[in-house]
Amino acid sequence: MRDGFITVAACTPLLHVADCAYNRGEIIRLAKEADRSHAHIILFPELCITGYTCGDLFFQRTLLDNAATSLDTIRQATADLGGVVVIGLPYQTGGKLYNAAAVLAGGELVGMVAKTHLPNYNEFYEKRYFTPCPSDSQDIGQAVFSLEGVPGFTFGVEICEDLWAAEPVSTSLALSGANFIVNLSAGNETAGKADYRRMLVTSTSARLICGYVYSGAGQDESTSDTVYSGHRLIAENGVLLSDSGLFTNGITYSEIDLQRIESERSKNTSFVMKNTVPRHSFSFSGIRTDKTKLTRYVSPTPFVPETTGELCGRAEEILSLQAHGLKKRLQHTGMNAVVGVSGGLDSTLALLVTVKAFDLLGKPRKDIIAVIMPCFGSSERTQRNARALAEAVGATVRVIDISDSVKRHFADINHDEQQHDTVYENAQARERTQVLFDIANGENSIVIGTGDLSESALGFCTFGGDHLSMYCVNAGVPKTLVRYLIEYIRDHATDYVLSVEFRVLGVAERMFGALLHDIIHTPVSPELLPSDGDRITQWTEDIIGPYELHDFFLYYAIRFSFSPRKVFRLAEYAFHNECEYNRGMIKTWLGVFYRRFFAAQFKRNAVPDSPKIGSVSLSPRADWRMPSDASVNEWMKEIDELPTKDGRYFLEEESGLLKEIDKL
């Protein structure tokens, strides 16, 4: 459990109502099957030893005795399992009968939990048989269970209606330190209930910042009046990780990330632990603590929605956030806008967002000044696309070749223009910024920044150059998302982006779509080294590494504060089908990410205003505060200890690549 992952198994066994001997055999069988999959938590439904639908048979001494005997048999049969087993049964103590959950670990009965909220409406009549969870019993009650020696492995138990009640038991359990909740349920199925159940489980895991495992009684329960579906759900912090669907038996698996939960709780000042814990608090040992195999889905592009429908909705939302942020700034200052347009992804998005902001204000688009500034590295392709884009949206276009200005600057500082070093590159970036600011001063305008979140994380911007602006609309958008936003505009919003003057019988829409398509597929490049006509000779990702890897690192290292070791493991798992990223390459670029991230803080401390877009923000005013001179040594030490070869593939040239990276 070094990385915080635990495997959870929600089980629905085959069942004969009131046949404890048969039921315990099925419970033992599924428990052992789950153990072979290295489950740490093995959860069964409510009253599964007897069946939920026994009715007045719950008063029968024979049934209760057999249930108690079966529990002991299960305890002995699961003694050598590596996981905690949680089982539902009727349990009698102190002259009262309880709808209970037994927690077993290492051959021991760790504790008993009783159901608090007993439904007694519609088809339910549990108060006929059972007593609500007592507050003063030494034998049974609400409880928090903890695994000795493993911080974070702390869970609580609630039973069916305890989740549906106005004051769910899970709330007090979570506030008492439970990082995940298990729910033994026997809720019957009615039309539409499954959707509500999914929503309830998922939203509870979000509200309580916890994991949630739900195991429902199966279709073998009595159908005299109701039908049961064996619905099993696993959620974590608002995300549904696994859903068995209806009318299935067997086991549903996933992994809960305890470190992720603790990271979220530690940052959330509204989540305040109670000073007291439930009356019962149990610790246990004797279960496995080995490395957890991952099966849950980990997206290689965590900033990008998975489905087309979700992406469209998210894209429109993000574009609106950007545009409304800029709208307020323009409205407040009473100014127009100057945008440097290069024909690349970032400046394209910035211009399109500026257009949207002007439309919201009812301002004429001609008051947007799109400045194109070719120099030594500018390719014909990007310059052509930049001009076509600016003209298509109705902006005022200015083309200013800065080559002579930069050469004069080289002469002023006695720099050999044949020496293509950092001075050669950054002089161009700073000249462009000077041009933009001076035009803005003369046109009652503000300079719109184009730099994105990924560039800010990596420090891949020129301090005093493209690092500066008067309002940066892209600062909260990572590079992997920029491309998808432009794709969305190409596919769904071309009609409102084009200027009225440019739109002719639908032809313009097709031309503009083709233009955006070419911009999307243009290699990302600073275009600061000499170009060769249409061919781009300088590729950003050859210099700093693939943006999809860096955005993945950024999401997990900053959003959840994960260690390099865990980020590496998640990346290897998420990209396991991407043959171009083997272990050595992931390790190499992870080192580049951390080195550049730490080194670039001085730039982030001086960034212009920008709207927050997603859950990861590096604004020094809102979300990220870090000393500029913090040492990266401890993080790099952990990266150095990571494995490189995996026995399947390894590029020999990686050793050379590592040496080159070390020179950066």
Image (cartoon, rainbow, N blue to C red):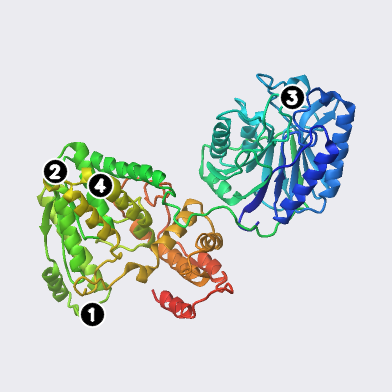
Q: Would you call the spot at circle 1 few (<14 residues within 10 Å), some (14-19), or many (20 or more)?
A: few
Instruction: Check disc 4 and report its element: helix, strand or loop.
Output: helix
Quarter of image, res 71:
top right
Q: Amino acid at mark 1?
A: Gln
Q: Tell me the residue that label 1 is attached to.
A: 419
Q: Amino acid at mark 2?
A: Val
Instruction: Check disc 3 and report its element: helix, strand or loop.
Output: loop
Q: Would you call the spot at circle 4 few (<14 residues within 10 Å), some (14-19), or many (20 or more)?
A: many
Q: Amino acid at mark 3?
A: Pro
Q: Tell me the residue that label 3 is attached to.
A: 132
Give whichever of 171, 297 is nearer the camera: 297
Using the image, determine if residue 614 lies above or below residue 544.
above
Q: Quadrant of the N terminus?
A: bottom right
Q: Give coordinates of residue 597: x percent, y percent.
A: 41, 62
Does any portion of residue 654 appear in the rendered image?
Answer: yes
Q: Tell me the residue that label 2 is attached to.
A: 500
Tell which circle, 4 or 1, labels the residue nearer the N-terminal end: 4
Using the image, determine if residue 483 lies above or below residue 25.
below
Measured Cα–Cα span from mark 1 to mark 3: 82 Å
Q: Tell me the residue that label 4 is attached to.
A: 353
Tell which circle, 1 or 2, labels the residue nearer the N-terminal end: 1
Using the image, determine if residue 5 lies above or below residue 88.
below
Measured Cα–Cα span from mark 2 to mark 4: 17 Å
Q: Quadrant of the C terminus?
A: bottom left
Tell which circle, 2 or 4, labels the residue nearer the N-terminal end: 4
Give whichever of 399, 173 is nearer the camera: 399
